[in-house]
Amino acid sequence: MLKSSSIALIANMNNLSKDDSFSFYINQPSRVENGSMAIKIASLADSSKTYTQTMKNINLESSARQVNMGFSYRKDFLKI
């Protein structure tokens, strides 16, 4: 079972000083909270054209948390 999460918050303010807007955002992209997967890895074939396969379990849990944030300001100069 794989468990993931993400979150986002956006705030907009309009008409701070006539015909403008200010936006602020903060988000965390989707990340794996818990989970693993198994992959089958084949070896190189030997001289008799046989090969072996090995199962490998991979932990998908994130070791860090990415957080993005930013802001924007827009002003319509044509309406001055």
Image: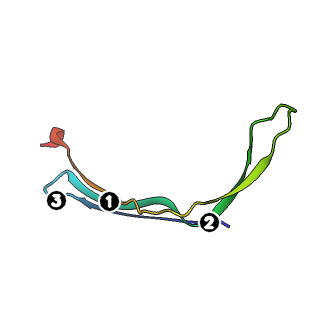
Looking at the rendered structure, the secondary structure element under dot 3 is loop
Q: Which mark is residue 16?
A: 3
Q: Quadrant of the C terminus?
A: top left
Q: As shown in the figure, which amino acid type bears the numbered disc 1?
A: Tyr
Residue 59's label in the rendered image is none
Q: Quadrant of residue 42?
A: top right
The colour mode here is rainbow
Horizontally, is 40 left or right of 58 in the view?
Answer: right
Q: Position of residue 68 (x, y in %)?
A: 35, 57
Q: Give, as a three-letter code, the residue at label 2.
A: Gly
Task: Look at mark 1 in the image and give the residue it sits on.
Answer: 25
Distance between the alpha carbons at the discs numbered 3 and 1? 18 Å
Observer-side mark, 2 or 1, equals 2
The crowd level at tag 1 (other Cα within 10 Å; few <14, some 14-19, many 20+) is some
Q: CA distance from mark 3 to mark 2?
A: 46 Å
Which disc, if any, is residue 35? 2
Residue at 83%, 31% in the rendered image: 47
Mark 2, Cα crowd under 10 Å, few <14 / some 14-19 / many 20+, is some
Residue, x 46% and y 63% (percent of image)?
Answer: 63
